[in-house]
Amino acid sequence: MTAPFDLSKFKTKPGGFKDRGNQRIEVVSVELPAAKKRKPFQAHYVQFPELWGVELEKLKSAAAWHLARRILRDVFKREYVGGPVVLSKEVTGLNRTSRCRATHNLVQPKLIRVVQEGNRAAIVTELLQLEGGKTLTLRDT
């Protein structure tokens, strides 16, 4: 059963008068209901390639594990939302030195490829996905 239509949501306010030429026009403004905000994107699960697990076990770096998980989550998010995967402090939650070291650790075994301009945050351009050496080129980079 649907709720009855409520006209009180569309109340008008007197806005005064405006002069157009030699005519006086009454102006009325309408209050519209506020738009509903969407919930932020939440990834409930992310596929983790087995090859990544093998390579990350060799590194024995907690920051690299953390960064790899964040990258895979953000790649999954970007499939729906769009945009580049930027490895900023806000996205990764790592401080600068740990993030740089972990990024370097993921680039060395060629799990990811990044582009970095000067002192700005690195942007992931490709992921090594499967055992056959297949890469996933990311859009909007």
Image (tube, rainbow, N blue to C red):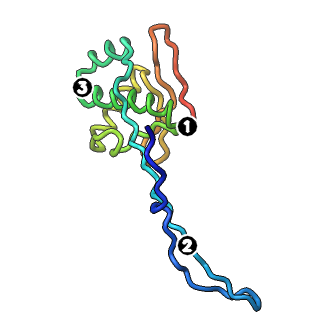
* The C terminus - image quarter: top right
The residue where tag 1 is placed is 141
Q: Tags 2 and 3 in contact by the CB under 8 Å rule? A: no
Circles 1 and 3, Cβ within 8 Å, touching? The answer is no
Q: Which mark is residue 38?
A: none
Residue at 67% x, 83% y is 25
Q: Amino acid at mark 1?
A: Thr
Look at mark 3 in the image and give the residue it sits on. 61
| Residue type at numbered disc 2 | Ser
Q: Residues within 10 Å of mark 1 (few under 14, many from 20)?
A: some
Residue 27 in the image, given as x and y percentages of width and height: 61, 79
Q: How much space separates mark 2 and mark 3, taking CA atoms? A: 61 Å
**Relative height, residue 77 to residue 129 (above, below):** below
The mark that comes first in sequence, 1 or 3, is 3
> To which residue does mark 2 refer?
29
Image quadrant holding the N terminus, namely top left
* Residue 66 picture location, percent across and down: 28, 30
Give the CA separation, mark 1 to mark 3: 27 Å
Give the quadrant of residue 17: bottom right
Answer few, some or many: residues within 10 Å of disc 2's Cα (few below 14, many 20 plus, some between 14 and 19). Answer: few
Hey, what amino acid is under mark 3? Ser
Q: Using the rendered view, name the quadrant where residue 55 is placed.
A: top left
Where does the image place residue 23, in percent across and percent down from the top left?
73, 88
Residue at 33% over, 45% down: 89
Look at discs 2 and 1 and give the one toward the viewer.
2
